[in-house]
Amino acid sequence: HINRLPAMLHDLAPDFIFVAGFPQKLPAALLDLPRLGCVNLHPSLLPRYRGPEPFFWQLMNGETQSGLTFHRIDTNFDTGPILVQRAITIEAEDDMNSFFSKFLTLSLDAIPDVLHALVAGIPGTPQPIEGASYAPYVTDAERQLNWMRSATQLRNQVRAWDLIGALAEIEGQRLLLRRARVINAFAPALSAKPGSILEHCAEGILVQAGQGTLLIEDYTHRTQ
């Protein structure tokens, strides 16, 4: 249990504690233990997208810029003073894998600056109140495609679910979608009903969305 950590680590006398993707709050006794403090790595430009699922929601919401934040840990999640931030551009073709690869590379490059800030005793910059948002746990409700949405929104939803796959029903077929791209994003809805198949082609299935069309490139049929 996490409340046992202060006693377990006390004799080690750590200089600092570093966490990334850790789902529990550190107890106050643990925050006070290392002489240089406790630091968390969060995959967003805080205070935006605090919480457990920043990767998913940034892709789902079609963000074009993300980043990473090393911050001192306080008694709440993702609210402590900022030590180092780096920005990441999310390209239109990025998916979860390429997004994470950018994040990892930039994180490793930033570590020397983080260590310098800790050794220098820099307290960090308090996070602004303005612009704060939250990235909650993802539920099954976010997994099902609604064909009334635009093709761009649907494609963002598919890439956010990555290899797990988003769920869709198309003309009575239940599909698991892993990759898709937008065709004619700004075209108004055609006479075809959203969710209707416009064409089967070598690249996949072309489906009418509420606005524009979505080409489903990687999918499997589901029986349940």
Image (spheres, grey):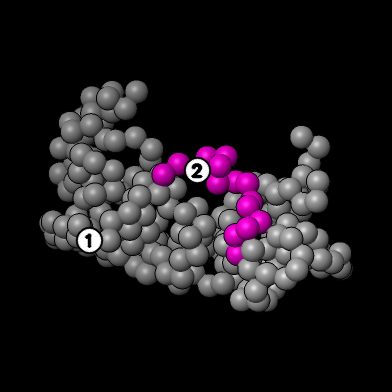
Q: Residue at x 58, y 56 (%)?
A: 157
| Quadrant into which the N terminus falls | top left
Of residues 209 and 49, the one nearer the viewer is 209
- Mark 2 secondary-structure assignment: loop
Q: Measuring from the top left, give residue 209's x and y in whole percent.
A: 68, 63
Instruction: From the image, give the main secondary structure of the stretch colored magenta.
Output: loop
Q: Which residue is mark 1?
A: 130
- Mark 1 secondary-structure assignment: loop
- Describe residue 188's horizontal placement relative to residue 199 as left or right: left
Residue 138's label in the rendered image is 2
Mark 1 neighbour class, 10 Å CA radius: few under 14, some 14 to 19, many 20 or more: few
Residue 85 part of the magenta segment: no
Q: Measuring from the top left, give residue 9's x and y in whole percent.
A: 26, 31
Image: 146 above or below 199: above
Instruction: Pick whichever of labels 2 and 1 is earlier in the sequence.
Output: 1
Report the span colored magenta: 136-150
Q: Residue at x 29, y 48 (%)?
A: 78
